[in-house]
Image (tube, helix red, strand yellow):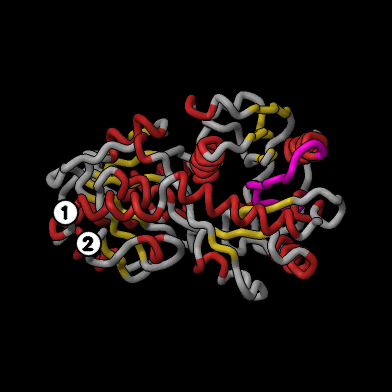
Amino acid sequence: MRIVLISTPLGFLGSGKGGGVELTLNSLVSGLLSLGHSVDVIAPRNSKLHKSNEKAKVHFVEGKDQISWQHQNYNSPVTIPDNSLLAGMLEKAIDIAKQSDVLLNMSYDWLPIWMTLNVEIPIAHIISMGSESSVIRNLISKVYAKHPNNFAFHSKIQADDYPFIKKPIIIGNGFKLNNYTFQESVKGPLGWVGRVAPEKGLEDAVYVANELGEQLKVWGVKEDETYASKIEKSFPSGTIDWMGFLSTNELQKELGKCRVLLNTPKWNEAYGNVVVEALACGVPVIAYKRGGPSEIIQHGKTGYLAEPDDKKNMLSYVEIIEKIKRKKCREWVEKNASTDIFANKVVNWLNKVMQDYK
């Protein structure tokens, strides 16, 4: 297959602005290449794929970034800026897709989904979020009525946000496991990974660290500086150790030293990439029982699921985290979330999409 893949329009690959989509894209490209498919990636200027993905051809587009739907109201209208990066990426993708088999869209936005109804080229969509926008949800419903196989989701609980989809296609996610080193660090620090923004609930993890009289290591882009500053001022100085945004290789080295990862989102995460990254390093995870992580974590085996927003419940699980066998965490990832497993699911799905266009 020749696959044309549209990246996120929120920032260049490697910036961290695209959140989990950046990691998912690189994992998927790696898996598709290893299965013998060819991949063209349409991405913002300055984007860089992981070194292992050099066989993929990257086509750069310039333009103005889209605003993430996570930072808009549910009933916000669609806005397309002048010199739109997304429109430019879509235009280039459609042109290249004329000589390809399928166009695979990884941007959660209105325009690529709308184009599905207006071109003859098969456009498949990996939906990376729950229902964050009424206008996008309504459009997915409209497109689904005509092309029921053109949407795939990372988790069942994410797909439940779109109840009109009767038999959702669930593809999970995948990770290049030789990029993650297993570490037996049962006495390490507390860790937290993610974009530093209100929906990620960092303050709950800081609360846990403060109650234990420990420091919390925080990795990720400070997307909301005001929010980050407010949390820092709410707890004793030094409770947070800001580690910044690191590449996968550097992050896994440091993350693997942690005895536990705390995962505290205030919304339904579609999947939970950082949860699997931690497990791949042997780090058990304590997460709120909502969204994708509630399907990934095996309660009592690879971590614990705390009641949503109950930071005291989360604290109680940190105190017994040594009961989790770290090798069980790594084993779960090997059996469920490798790049090959993920890529095979995606290929099987894309074959269904293409069949409908014949």
Residue 267 shows in this picture: yes
Residue kind at label 2, given as amino acid type: Leu
Q: Describe residue 252's horizontal placement relative to residue 170 as left or right.
A: left
Q: Which residue is mark 2?
A: 315
Residue 317 lies, in percent from the top left, at 21, 63
Residue 89 lies, in percent from the top left, at 74, 36
Q: Which residue is mark 1?
A: 212
Q: Is residue 170 magenta?
A: no
Q: Residue at x 69, y 42 (%)?
A: 66
Front one among 226 and 242:
242
Q: Disc 2 on helix, strand or loop?
A: helix
Residue 312 lies, in percent from the top left, at 25, 66
Front one among 54 and 297:
54
In primary-sequence order, the first of circles 1 and 2 is 1
Q: Which stretch did the figure color magenta? A: 98-111
Check whether the beta carbons of the residues at disc 1 and disc 2 lie within 8 A of each other. yes
Quarter of the image for the C terminus: give it: bottom right
Quarter of the image for the N terminus: give it: top right
Q: Residue at x 80, y 56 (%)?
A: 357
Q: Residues within 10 Å of mark 1 (few under 14, many from 20)?
A: few
Q: Which mark is on residue 71?
A: none
Residue kind at label 1, given as amino acid type: Leu
Q: Residues within 10 Å of mark 2 (few under 14, many from 20)?
A: many
Instruction: Identify whether 12 is placed above or below 329.
Output: above
Q: Is residue 101 magenta?
A: yes
Tell me which corner region of the image, top left, top right, bottom left or bottom right, holds residue 297. bottom left
Q: Residue at x 26, y 60 (%)?
A: 303
Q: Describe residue 186's horizontal placement relative to residue 299 as left or right.
A: left
Q: Disc 1 on helix, strand or loop?
A: loop
